Image (cartoon, rainbow, N blue to C red):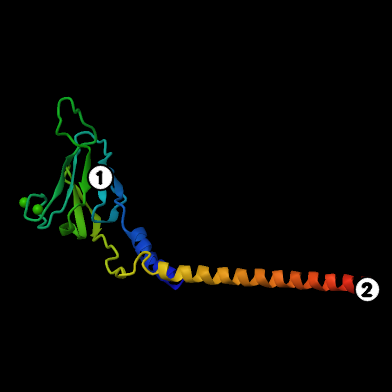
């Protein structure tokens, strides 16, 4: 019994560790004429964030990215961007046209809190936030002992079964003896009555 309990105690933290492990999520940001919905996204490595441009003003495009040196473009060292986002595309004639930036966070080097810029083609600009955290797993789960599994159970259980069988046998014997005693007394009483 103790070993079974020990086994359960060992398994529980592992199960909860699995439960805590992160499933990749996808976050969607709607890029509007005047703002992003939402204006701040917090996610972890292996998640995806997608920025959809729904600003349908004619000839206005958006480019979202990290402008580290503030020179209003995204081509300097350590910078990244969506590329130009249109509100609609004619993919038959322009296969490179994009309405969305699907940013897969697949590198732990991206961990950090960013202030991104959305630079519009009309010269205006807003700042939005993207917070990328490390995907923290429970790494210090209890060590799996040598006796993980059923190595001890077999030693204890037969002993328990044996002792419970013995108890049943004892009870049966007691019942049998009581019945035998009762029958004997009855027989004796009948014999005495006759004589
Ligand atoms: Ca720049
Ligand atoms: Ca530059």
Name the image quarter holding residue 141: bottom left
Viewer-side residue, 172 vs 124: 172
Q: Who's the residue at 15% across and 25% down the image? A: 93
User: What is the secondary structure assignment of the residue under circle 2?
Assistant: loop
Q: How crowded is mark 2: few (under 14 residues within 10 Å), some or many (20 or more)?
A: few
Q: Residue at label 1? A: 51
Q: Residues within 10 Å of mark 1 (few under 14, many from 20)?
A: many
| Earlier residue among tags 2 and 1 | 1
User: What is the secondary structure assignment of the residue under circle 1?
Assistant: strand
Ligand 1 has an atom within 8 Å of the beta carbon of the residue at disc 2: no
Question: What is the number of the mark on residue 186?
Answer: none
Vertical order, 134 against 159 (above or below): above
Q: Residue at label 2? A: 195
Vertical order, 23 against 185 (above or below): above
Farthest residue, direction top: 92
Residue 16: image x %, image y %?
37, 63
Farthest residue, direction front: 195
Number of dots carrying numbers: 2
* In the displayed structure image, the side of residue 160 where residue 87 appears, left or right: left
Q: Who's the residue at 29% across and 51% down the image? A: 24
* In the displayed structure image, the side of residue 161 where residue 7 appears, left or right: left
* In the displayed structure image, the side of residue 34 where residue 179 appears, left or right: right
Q: Who's the residue at 19% across and 34% down the image? A: 59
Vertical order, 108 against 187 (above or below): above
| Mark 2 or 1, closer to the camera | 2
Which quadrant of the rendered structure holds the C terminus? bottom right
Residue 143: image x %, image y %?
29, 70
Viewer-side residue, 65 vs 134: 134
Q: Who's the residue at 88% across and 73% down the image? A: 189
Residue 98: image x %, image y %?
19, 36
């Amino acid at each position: 019994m103790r070993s079974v309990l020990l086994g359960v105690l060992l398994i529980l933290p592992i199960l909860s560790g699995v439960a805590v492990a992160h499933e990749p999520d996808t976050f969607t940001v709607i890029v509007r004429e005047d703002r992003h919905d939402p204006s701040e996204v917090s996610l972890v490595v292996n998640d995806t964030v997608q920025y959809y441009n729904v600003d349908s003003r004619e000839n206005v495009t958006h480019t979202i990215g990290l402008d580290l040196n503030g020179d209003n473009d995204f081509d300097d060292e350590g910078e990244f961007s969506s590329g130009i986002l249109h509100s609609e595309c004619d993919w038959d004639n322009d296969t490179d046209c994009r309405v969305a930036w699907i940013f897969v966070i697949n590198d732990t080097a991206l961990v950090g809190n960013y202030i991104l810029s959305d630079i519009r083609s009309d010269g205006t600009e807003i700042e939005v936030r993207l917070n990328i955290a490390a995907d923290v797993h429970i790494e210090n789960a209890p060590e799996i002992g040598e006796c993980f599994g059923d190595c001890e159970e077999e030693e204890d259980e037969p002993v328990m079964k044996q002792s419970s069988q013995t108890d049943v046998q004892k009870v049966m014997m007691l019942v049998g003896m009581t019945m035998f005693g009762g029958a004997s007394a009855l027989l004796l009483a009948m014999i005495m009555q006759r004589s």
